[in-house]
């Protein structure tokens, strides 16, 4: 199965209450809270669709391997920029 095959699809003609751009710390929480209260919510995300199996749940390993901003093997664009 490729990434595109498991990525959720949304019918663009369906009316929703809220569209949230980005599922980061604030967007993900906001989407969960609004949907829990019964609103129809769509979240737009730039990166590929990931499941919980794609992530390590070992906080020490993630910290020591510097995976917080640069996960090895993922070629995702980051908003973090380093100036020379």
Image (cartoon, rainbow, N blue to C red):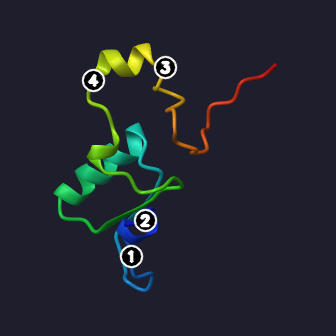
Q: State the image coordinates of residue 47 (x, y, percent, origin top left).
A: 51, 53
Q: Residue furthest bottom?
A: 13
Which residue is depicted at the point 40% across and 47% down?
A: 27
Numbered tag placed on residue 10 in the rendering: 1
Which residue is depicted at the point 31% across and 51% down?
A: 51
Which residue is depicted at the point 26% across and 30% down?
A: 57
Query: What residue does disc 2 label?
Result: 2
Numbered tag placed on residue 52 in the rendering: none
Q: Nearer the viewer, mark 4 or mark 1?
A: 4
Foreground: 80 or 36?
80
How far apart marks 1 and 2 lie (CA) works out to 18 Å
How far apart marks 4 and 1 lie (CA) works out to 33 Å
Query: What residue does disc 3 label?
Result: 66
Going from the N terminus, do you reach mark 3 or mark 4 first? 4
Could you say whether the residue bearing mark 4 is in a helix, strand or loop? loop
Place residue 9 in its image quadrant: bottom left
Q: State the image coordinates of residue 10 (x, y, percent, origin top left).
A: 39, 76
Q: State the image coordinates of residue 58 (x, y, percent, origin top left).
A: 27, 23
Query: What residue does disc 4 label?
Result: 58
How far apart marks 3 and 4 lie (CA) works out to 12 Å
Could you say whether the residue bearing mark 1 is in a helix, strand or loop? loop
How far apart marks 3 and 1 lie (CA) works out to 34 Å
When the figure is inspected, residue 45 is found, relative to residue 11, above or below; the finding is above
Q: How many marks?
A: 4
Instruction: Categorize mark 4 by other alpha carbons within 10 Å: few (<14), some (14-19), many (20+).
Output: few
Left or right: 71 in relation to 58: right
Q: Residue furthest front?
A: 1
Going from the N terminus, do you reach mark 3 or mark 1 first? 1
Going from the N terminus, do you reach mark 4 or mark 2 first? 2
């Amino acid at each position: 199965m490729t990434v595109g095959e498991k990525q959720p699809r949304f019918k663009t003609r369906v009316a929703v209450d809220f569209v949230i751009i980005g599922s980061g710390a604030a967007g993900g929480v906001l989407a969960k809270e609004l949907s829990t209260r019964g609103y129809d919510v769509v979240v737009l995300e730039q990166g590929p669709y990931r499941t919980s199996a794609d992530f390590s749940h070992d906080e020490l390993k993630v910290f020591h391997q510097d995976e917080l901003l640069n996960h090895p093997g993922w070629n995702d664009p980051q908003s973090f920029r380093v100036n020379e």
